[in-house]
């Protein structure tokens, strides 16, 4: 008798040890599952040209990965408890998966961000109801084990059903852009400085004549006295082959990444504290122009004009002569600039429209003009597409505004929201950036650029980044919108757009 008691105690001790130790293993497995599994599966899917919409694919993969991570704890724990209770092995498997599914549903219920928009709570409730109902029915039926197994399968199907519905009703994927060439400028060096700034992502690479110019941090900083100093590299690549034709290195203050802007005459503007006009071969086209204060942040879409933010005010500068155009404008922080004006999304007009949350202000030599206002909370920053049209997003809608504020065209987003990623100089195409990050520190799961036609607001192509950067890839259009360059120092790629 005593021997049987000690045997039972030993079994329960084993069950307790398995349950406790399994929690730590499951935690590590979950961290691995929600980042590495989706990222790897998306890369494999791209390799075999299986192109499900990325957000739907990530939602499905995340659900399955979370279930697998929980199963790492739930199944061994249930097995150990079943061992202590002397349950049949097949019953332990069924109950292990049941516990896994219930815990997955509970986690998805209380963590809707992990479930994304494709897993509403009604499906989670339905999945739980199917599972619990099947288990109860299995106790009252002669074929209880089979019913229990089918309940597990049905619950998993219902839990993933929102993803399949979203996939079925998703619009067709636009054609994938064709890769022309790829080049590695440097490998695994200081990536955060090269691609970590969303605002600089469209200002690190530009087309200039028959070249592509890029600028990046070429290594780890060193100190001169107490000041950290970086070495920056400026490279000129042949558009046809991607080969490096010219290269220049120079030093600058650490964290003060130089930026590039494409002009409308085949040159480029380099801003590294002073403004320099460059030929495609990196020789200087015009003398440097050093502004006494302020900063240069924006170039007009047609490449004719850039903005010198003087705090207060903004002065428009001709990109060919580097000379001021007209008198300073009464706007200090524009979000975009044209040949004659700047726009911003400030709240200057909220007293006149207290119920609205989004305001678009155009400022030219005649003053500031409210051209658009809305109750949308989610309106993004306005961007000039041409000197006469402005791109604006808000709550799932893309709008094209005239400079007088009239809505010229509008359409729903192709696939969620994404920041603006550039426009071609002819104003015919623009790009939006799509990605998802997870973890601490955050890691990219995928990155896409969706190319839109300005006249129809329809997606015409998608650029899928295979070598993921730290946060966001560089991006730039050729002047005619037929070519698109994107990537990082690890892998800079030129794409042919359809």
Image (cartoon, helix red, strand yellow):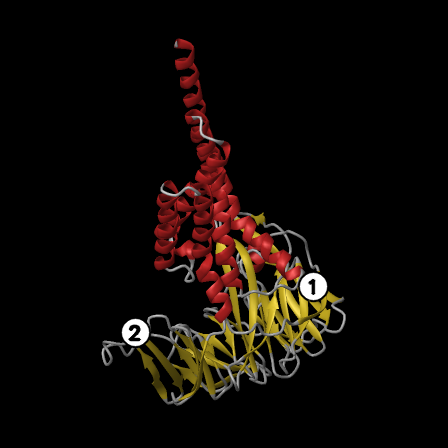
Gap in angstroms between the C-alphas marked 2 and 1: 46 Å
Question: Viewed as shown, does residue 261 lie left or right of 314?
Answer: right
User: Mark 2 against mark 1, which lies toward the viewer?
Assistant: 2
Residue position for label 1 = 248
Is residue 61 placed above or below 381 in the rendered structure? Answer: above
Q: Secondary structure at mark 2?
A: loop
Contact (Cβ within 8 Å) of mark 2 with mark 1: no
Q: Residue 27, can we see it?
A: no
* 421 displayed left or right of 11: right
Crowding near pointer 1: few (<14 within 10 Å), some, many (20+)? Answer: few
| Above or below: residue 229 compared with residue 449 | above
Residue 475 lies, with reference to residue 193, above or below; the image says below
Task: Give the percent coordinates (x, y) of residue 136.
Answer: 35, 44
Q: Residue 48 has which mark?
A: none
Q: Earlier in the sequence, mark 2 or mark 1?
A: 1
Residue labelled with disc 2 = 357
Q: Quarter holding the N terminus?
A: top left
């Amino acid at each position: 008798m005593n021997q049987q008691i000690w045997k039972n105690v030993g079994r329960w001790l084993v069950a307790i040890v398995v349950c406790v130790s399994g929690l730590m293993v499951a935690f590590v497995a979950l961290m691995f599952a929600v980042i590495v599994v989706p990222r790897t599966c998306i890369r494999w899917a791209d390799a075999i040209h299986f192109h499900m919409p990325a957000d739907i694919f990530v939602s499905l993969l995340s659900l399955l990965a979370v279930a697998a991570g929980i199963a790492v704890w739930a199944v061994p724990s249930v097995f150990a408890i079943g061992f202590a209770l002397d349950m049949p092995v097949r019953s332990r498997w069924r109950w292990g998966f049941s516990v896994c599914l219930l815990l997955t549903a509970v986690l998805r219920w209380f963590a809707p961000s992990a479930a994304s928009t494709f897993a509403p709570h009604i499906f989670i409730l339905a999945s739980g109801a199917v599972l619990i109902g099947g288990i109860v029915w299995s106790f009252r039926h002669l074929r209880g084990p089979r019913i229990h197994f089918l309940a597990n399968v049905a619950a998993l199907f219902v839990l993933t059903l929102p993803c399949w519905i979203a996939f079925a009703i998703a619009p067709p994927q636009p054609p994938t852009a064709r890769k022309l060439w790829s080049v590695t400028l440097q490998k695994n060096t200081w990536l955060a400085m090269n691609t970590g700034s969303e605002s600089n992502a469209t200002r690190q690479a530009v087309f200039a004549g028959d070249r592509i110019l890029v600028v990046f941090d070429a290594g780890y900083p060193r100190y001169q006295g107490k000041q950290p100093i970086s070495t920056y590299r400026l490279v000129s690549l042949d558009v046809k082959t991607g080969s490096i034709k010219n290269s220049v290195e120079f030093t600058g203050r650490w964290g003060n990444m130089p930026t590039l802007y494409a002009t409308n005459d085949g040159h480029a503007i380099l801003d590294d504290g002073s403004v320099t006009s460059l030929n495609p071969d990196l020789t200087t086209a015009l003398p440097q122009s050093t502004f006494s204060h302020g900063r240069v942040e924006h170039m007009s879409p047609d490449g004719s004009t850039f903005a010198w933010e003087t705090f207060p005010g903004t002065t428009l500068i001709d990109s060919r002569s580097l000379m001021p155009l007209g008198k300073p404008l009464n706007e200090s922080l524009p979000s975009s600039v044209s040949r004659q004006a700047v726009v911003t999304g400030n709240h200057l007009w909220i007293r006149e429209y207290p119920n609205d949350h989004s305001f678009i202000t155009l400022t030219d030599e005649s003053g500031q003009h409210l051209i658009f206002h809305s109750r949308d909370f989610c309106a993004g920053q306005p961007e000039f597409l041409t000197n006469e049209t402005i791109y604006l997003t808000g709550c799932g809608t893309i709008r094209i505004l005239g400079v007088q504020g009239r809505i010229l065209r509008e359409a729903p987003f192709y696939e969620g929201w994404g920041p603006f990623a550039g426009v071609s100089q002819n104003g015919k195409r623009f790009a939006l950036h799509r990605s998802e990050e997870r973890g601490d520190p955050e890691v990219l799961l995928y990155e896409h650029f969706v190319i839109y036609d300005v006249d129809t607001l329809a997606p015409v192509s998608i650029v899928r980044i295979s070598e993921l950067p730290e946060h966001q890839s560089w991006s730039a259009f050729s002047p005619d919108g037929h070519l698109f360059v994107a990537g990082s120092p690890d892998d800079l790629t030129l794409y042919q757009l359809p």
